[in-house]
Image (cartoon, rainbow, N blue to C red):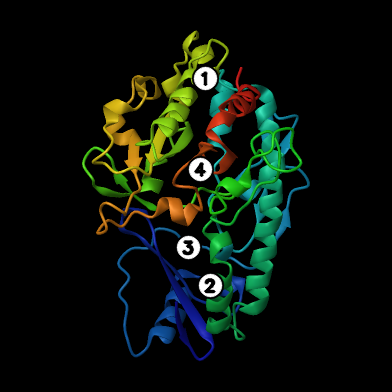
């Protein structure tokens, strides 16, 4: 953002080497490419800018509209600007495709699509309210305020970056008000209904420090994150083995999926983050069934600074999880947290999952 004499110009890098630029013009009728560039050059003066190619030119104001409903009979869905209109300054990304894909592939029942109205409808209203506050604080035109824009964006960064978007209790969020309630106190740094925040952990196989958030690509899969705790202790390792055994029971969802054309690996991945020393635990000590047709090299992490004080990992302390006992965290394909429980609550987690699987 560049501001001069109360007028502001914005720059946003785009795909294929393009750059989106925005500059004010007196009226919509005068919004020609030449007028926009003239306004831009006046703001940049005495500096210059050379434009060699214009891919697209448009006009935006601060209109705000929200549809009364985001879907019809869970068969027709409004997305993007068909659902809501606001200024481009408050745009955020949302991910709904995985729900449709799971229904089309026969993984989940049609009822899962009802959560689109529940989740997207709430977030849309919050987004439009944020856009209005941003526009009121820093209107485009003569009264433009660079400080107001900066202050609003800074204050609302958690929302605009989607890290503070929180879904209420429902089919895909197990918290107070739902049939199954998470034990939020086990991980106060991981809020049920919000995106799982990333922390630094170590890859167990080679000690490499990695961003844990990169273990959650948008590939349509749920992640069962087992914070296994101090598995160098026999009792804690037995608790982990119990998780593995319950997941393998005939009625568990992994076995149910395995009986169909859809494999469990198409729908789920299990990640283990333990707090023991890499010197005391081998990957081979962990129940092998947790990594069926998977890759333990990518799926097992460690967070232990006591034996390796130079490491940067601090996931357990940042998440507020007991390094001795750990917990279970179920993460949806959009990286929002669905459930938190004790390792012994694996049966509750299975009950929750079976409600969204065919």
Which is more toward the observer, 186 or 135? 186
For mark 1, does the 10 Å Cα neighbourhood hold few (<14), some (14 to 19), or many (20 or more) residues? some
Disc 2/disc 3 C-alpha distance (Å): 28 Å
The percent coordinates of residue 73 (x first, y second) are 75, 29
Residue 88 screen position, x and y as percent: 56, 62
Residue 16 at least partly seen:
yes
Q: Which residue is drawn at 44% across and 59% down?
A: 56
Q: Is mark 2 on a helix, strand or loop?
A: helix
- Badge 4 element: loop
| Residue 349 numbered mark, or none | none
Q: Which quadrant is the C terminus positioned in?
A: top right
Q: Which mark lies nearer to you, 4 or 3?
A: 4
Along the line of sight, the residue nearer the viewer: 320 or 233: 233
- Can you give x and y, in whole percent of width and height, for residue 128 in the image? 68, 60
Alpha-carbon span between mark 2 and mark 1: 45 Å
Report the residue marked by disc 4: 335
Residue identifier under label 2:
154
1 or 3: mark nearer the eye: 1
């Amino acid at each position: 953002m560049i501001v001069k004499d109360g007028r502001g110009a914005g720059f946003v890098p785009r795909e294929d080497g393009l750059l989106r630029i925005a500059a004010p013009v007196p009226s919509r009728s005068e919004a020609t490419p030449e007028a926009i560039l003239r306004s831009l050059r006046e703001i940049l003066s005495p500096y210059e800018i050379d434009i060699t190619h214009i891919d697209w030119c448009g006009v935006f104001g601060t209109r705000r509209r929200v549809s009364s409903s985001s879907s019809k009979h869970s068969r027709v869905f409004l997305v993007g600007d068909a659902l809501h209109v606001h200024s481009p300054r408050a745009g955020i990304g949302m991910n709904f495709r995985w729900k449709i894909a799971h229904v089309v592939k026969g993984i989940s029942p049609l009822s899962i699509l009802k959560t689109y109205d529940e989740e997207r409808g709430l977030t849309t209203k919050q987004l439009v309210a944020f856009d209005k506050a941003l526009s009121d604080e820093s209107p485009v035109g003569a009264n433009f305020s660079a400080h107001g824009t900066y202050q609003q964006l800074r204050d609302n960064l958690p929302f605009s970056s989607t890290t503070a978007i929180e879904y209420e209790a429902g089919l895909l969020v197990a918290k107070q008000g739902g049939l199954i309630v998470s034990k939020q106190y086990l991980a106060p740094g991981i809020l049920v209904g919000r995106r799982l925040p990333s922390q630094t952990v170590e890859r167990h196989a080679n000690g490499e420090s990695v961003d844990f958030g990169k273990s959650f690509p948008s590939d349509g899969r749920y992640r069962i994150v087992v914070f296994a705790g101090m598995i160098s202790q026999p009792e804690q390792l037995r608790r982990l083995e119990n998780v593995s055994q319950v997941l393998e029971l005939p009625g568990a969802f992994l076995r149910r999926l395995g009986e169909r054309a859809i494999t469990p690996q198409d729908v789920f991945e299990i990640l283990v983050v333990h707090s023991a020393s890499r010197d005391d635990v081998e990957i081979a000590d962990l129940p092998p069934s947790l990594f069926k047709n998977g890759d333990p090299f990518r799926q097992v992490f460690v967070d232990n600074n006591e034996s390796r004080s130079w490491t940067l990992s601090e996931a357990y302390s940042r998440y507020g999880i007991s390094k001795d006992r750990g917990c279970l965290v179920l993460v949806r394909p959009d990286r929002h947290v669905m459930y938190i429980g004790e390792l012994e609550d694996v049966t509750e987690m299975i009950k929750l999952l079976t409600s969204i699987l065919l």
